[in-house]
Image: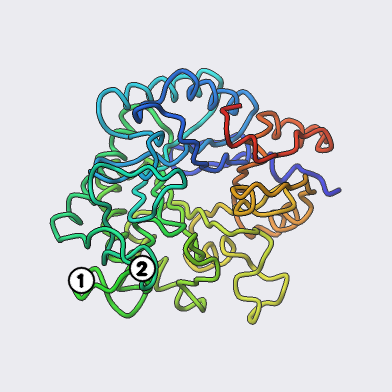
């Protein structure tokens, strides 16, 4: 096995200093009663800090909009009680020597898995949840302006509470991604259009508002994906030029780090250009924008997370492919999800060469805060 030293080199960006290149990926847990993080949530994140994760990204936590979440246990990132809960979380993480940021989210018109429904009507760019599948209402200009402002307020609260970064969730078919996707954005105003560059205006305005709210030195991350939970084969950018027209304006608006989600991190983004061992999504994002990137997708496991939610078993897998890509400077950081969910000591075990002792992820881990 290749040396893991590359994973354990420090990383610095603006006000952020990390001891290693390992990020805990955001994973929806739906275990915040009434939307308020409690002691169990704080202990859950603290264990990952104690386990020497470089940067912890929270589960998606939602902005102040009437139907911004699709499960009852998803935490709020607004309101005095929820923010007090998040203050306990970040204080616990810092006490354990960790660094952390919230992932700020709006679920759009996507339904949850439990059947729970919000009190208000769900919203999206064009009242669609997928191509030709109506659900909820089309957002008005006022709705859009209020949503942009709510993202900015949440980011400002993250900085005020003492978090180290904030991440905007723009992936996986949720609200921001529904604006990106031509299948769900049929608007004929300034937030629609035939090109990905035109449909990115909503996201660009969110990023700009967030940057204004947090100032120049607070790192802003953005999670993006080509695939959607509504369509695993969907692609927003089919060429590097199209990707540049998508990511460039986001970088210019204030994104410091692109968190590039793939179902399998080792798959090339444009194999027709650089072959089957070519750059992945994070690699191309870094090449195009010059910004730091995080790669994520089935790190340390044999199967992707989609199957996990339907109960499919996976096995632990080596990280040789990951190390090879990091050694060639393809991307800067790597996010680990399910492997860290089932084993808070994953980082230490990998560092010590004890990867064979890592607890194997099972779907049962999704049901509890280990």
Nearest the camera: 288 or 151? Answer: 151
Instruction: In the rendered view, tell whether residue 40 sits above or below residue 311.
Output: above
- Left or right of 62 on screen, residue 172: right
The label number, if any, that marks residue 190 in the structure image: 1
Q: Residues within 10 Å of mark 1 (few under 14, many from 20)?
A: few
Nearest the camera: 222 or 104? Answer: 104
> Furthest residue to the left?
142
User: Which image quarter: residue 81?
Assistant: top left
- Left or right of 305 on screen, residue 226: left
| Front tag of 2 and 1 | 2
Q: Residue at x 42, y 29 (%)?
A: 32
Whole-percent x, y for residue 158 in the image = 34, 34
The quarter of the picture where the C terminus appears is top right
Whole-percent x, y for residue 350 in the image = 76, 37
Q: Secondary structure beneath disc 1? A: loop
> Which residue matches tag 2?
133
- Left or right of 72 on screen, residue 357: right
Which circle's residue, 2 or 1, is located before the other in the chain?
2
- Give the colour scheme shown: rainbow
- Left or right of 289 on screen, residue 363: right
User: Which image quarter: residue 174?
Assistant: bottom left
Whole-percent x, y for residue 104 in the image = 37, 43
Whole-percent x, y for residue 209 in the image = 25, 50
Q: Residue at x 65, y 54 (%)?
A: 304
Nearest the camera: 40 or 2? Answer: 40
């Amino acid at each position: 096995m290749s040396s893991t030293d590359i994973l354990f080199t420090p990383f610095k960006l603006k006000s952020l200093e990390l001891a290693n290149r390992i990020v805990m990926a955001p994973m929806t847990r739906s275990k915040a009663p009434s939307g308020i993080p409690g002691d169990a949530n704080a202990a859950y994140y603290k264990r990952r800090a104690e386990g020497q994760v470089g940067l912890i990204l929270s589960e998606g936590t939602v902005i102040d909009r009437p139907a911004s979440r699709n499960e009852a246990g998803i935490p709020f990132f607004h309101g005095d009680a929820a923010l007090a809960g998040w203050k306990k979380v970040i204080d616990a993480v810092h006490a354990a020597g960790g660094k952390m940021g919230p992932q700020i989210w709006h679920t759009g018109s996507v339904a949850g898995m439990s059947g729970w429904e919000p009190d208000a009507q769900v919203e999206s760019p064009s009242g669609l949840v997928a191509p030709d599948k109506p659900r909820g209402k089309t957002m008005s200009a006022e709705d859009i302006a209020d949503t942009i402002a709510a993202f900015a307020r949440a980011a400002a609260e993250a900085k005020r509470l003492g978090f180290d970064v904030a991440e905007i969730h723009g992936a996986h078919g949720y609200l921001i991604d529904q604006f990106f996707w031509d299948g769900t954005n049929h608007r004929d105003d300034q937030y629609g259009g035939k090109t990905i560059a035109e449909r990115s205006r909503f996201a660009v305005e969110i990023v700009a508002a967030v940057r204004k709210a947090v100032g120049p030195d607070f790192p802003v991350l953005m999670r993006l994906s080509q695939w959607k939970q509504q369509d695993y084969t969907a692609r927003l950018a089919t060429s590097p030029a199209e990707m540049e027209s998508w990511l460039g304006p986001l970088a210019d608006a204030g994104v410091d780090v692109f968190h590039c989600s793939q179902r399998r991190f080792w798959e090339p983004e444009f194999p027709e250009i650089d072959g089957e061992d070519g750059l992945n999504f994070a690699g191309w994002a870094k090449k195009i924008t010059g910004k730091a990137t995080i790669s994520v997708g089935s790190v340390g496991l044999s199967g992707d997370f989609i199957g996990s939610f339907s109960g499919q078993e996976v096995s632990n897998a080596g990280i040789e492919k990951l190390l090879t890509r990091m050694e060639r400077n393809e991307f800067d950081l790597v996010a680990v999800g399910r492997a860290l969910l089932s084993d808070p000591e994953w980082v230490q075990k990998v560092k010590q060469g004890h990867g064979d002792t890592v607890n194997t992820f099972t779907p049962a881990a999704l049901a509890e805060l280990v």
